[in-house]
Amino acid sequence: MKDIQTFAKQYQQEMGWDISDESYDKSRDSLLNNYMQLTTEVAEVAEELRKAFNLTASYVEEGMEEEQAFELAKNQIKENIGKELSDCLAYMLKFYNYFGIHVEDSFYAKMEEVKNRKNKDLVKPSK
């Protein structure tokens, strides 16, 4: 992740897409704009999931077994959902870089915090 974070910072600066730190007003506007763009990309991930579920239902209607239908649908959206997830990651990296947060350190610290929560779910989710 360190390499991806460094690449993202340089790339976003080259493209003029980094979050402004020129002044409070510009930073606020830039942060809000990037937040809205991130939420738009998250919605596009949801659209790809919806597409997969609709395709699955369609294939099942045509007589295909549900598991096989879902595998086929997942393969059909794989490229596009990968692109949308990459867009999400790019926007998230902007925030990490703007605030000077190291992605890996933050991620592992958060996962350790979650692991040690007292109020975590009793049943582990299925894979």
Image (spheres, rainbow, N blue to C red):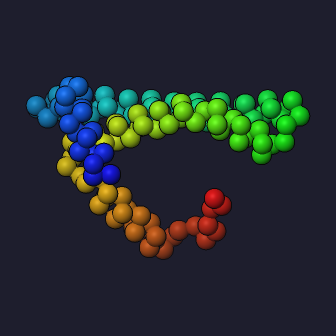
Query: Closer to the camera, 103 or 116?
Result: 103
Q: Residue at x 41, y 64 (%)?
A: 111
Q: Residue at x 61, y 71 (%)?
A: 122
Q: Residue at x 23, y 25 (%)?
A: 15
- Direction from residue 40 to residue 20 in the image, left or right: left
Q: Residue at x 46, y 38 (%)?
A: 85
- Direction from residue 11 to residue 114 in the image, left or right: right
Tell me if I can see residue 50 in this picture. Answer: no
Tell me if I can see residue 80 in this picture. Answer: yes
Query: Closer to the camera, 60 or 39?
Result: 60
- Direction from residue 33 to residue 115 in the image, left or right: right
Q: Position of residue 52 (x, y in %)?
A: 67, 34
Q: Splitting the image into 4 quarters, where does residue 9 fall?
A: top left
Furthest-left residue in this view = 22
When the figure is inspected, residue 109 is found, relative to residue 23, above or below; the finding is: below
Q: Position of residue 31 (x, y in %)?
A: 26, 34
Q: Position of residue 37 (x, y in %)?
A: 38, 29
Q: Position of residue 102 (x, y in %)?
A: 25, 54
When the figure is inspected, residue 62 is found, relative to residue 107, above or below; the finding is: above
When the figure is inspected, residue 115 is found, relative to residue 3, above or below; the finding is: below
